[in-house]
Amino acid sequence: MERKYCFLASAALALALTACGGSGSGRKADAGLINEFQVSEILMTADKDYRISMDYGDAYLELYTSIHWPERLGSNDISVLQDSLLYFAYGDTAVTDIRAAIRAYLDNTSIVEGIKSVTEVDSLPADTMTYFNNVTASVMEVNEDMATYQVVSSTYLGGAHPMTSVRPFTYSFAQGQVLGFDNMFLPGVTADSIMPVIRTALARQLSVPVDALDRGGIFVSQLTYPGKPYIASNTLYFHYDPYEIGPYALGPVDVAVYPDEVDRFLRPDVKSLFDQGF
């Protein structure tokens, strides 16, 4: 078994941003032509392997995790962002130390039910039944106003295929919180208000009429709620996991909605995160 922590040293990255982008939380240089936004993060990876005995036989279990852990994003307070990463990646609300959370994740074999005994092993033998649980958290986008991350959890406990869940989210530096439906949209905006926009955008992606989304493999009867919202590449996305609105073969679905399609619904501070001249 090999355990690895803090695989890379903290990297201080200077993002060169044009002066017209962002709200200017970075340090200006060269008479305002360039803003410097200091970013420091640690890439942490760790794994642990077990041999497990159950009522119906023996198997092996591999636990693995990888996380881009933010140490500094400009001069912003990112404690809520760090807490959110711990929760979305490891379901932990009590531990605030990332290394302790990783160790607790590696020591927890309860994902497999009916275990009679557990033995840690140094490696996984070839040609044996192996279960696994992998959790990765990575940066999708960072700028002076926000950071978008993606947490992917993939579990295989037998059957035809692994079960994968993706949790993308955007953290607003100005709000100091993760953006969700409740704090992205104006008061009074409901799911029923947003769904026509999502259906239209999804039909555009699939190149089918709005009233024929089933031709694109969508379970229309299940497309009744907004997916998980996040911002990337100047676009508002709504994420759905496999099986939420379509068969497993369809994979995850990220519906791209352009800012001008929802600007009438967005709060002013959320509008400012898009470069659309609002």
Image: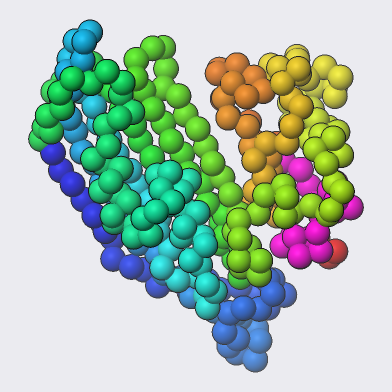
Task: Give percent across and percent down for residue 106.
Answer: 26, 41
Task: Quadrant for residue 222, please give it.
Answer: top right
Q: Nearer the viewer, residue 115 or 244?
A: 115
Task: Quadrant for residue 174, please give it.
Answer: bottom right
Position of the C terminus, as image quadrant, is bottom right
Q: Please give left or right for residue 234 compared with residue 46 in the image.
A: right
Residue most extreme to the right = 264
Residue at left offset 75%, top offset 60%: 270
Residue at left offset 27%, top offset 37%: 108
> How many marks are shown on the rendered structure?
0
Residue most extreme to the top = 56
Q: Is residue 71 magenta?
A: no
Task: Give percent across and percent down for residue 217.
Answer: 69, 16
Q: Nearer the viewer, residue 57 or 115?
A: 115
Position of the N terminus, as image quadrant, is top left
Q: Please give left or right for residue 60 compared with residue 150 in the image.
A: left
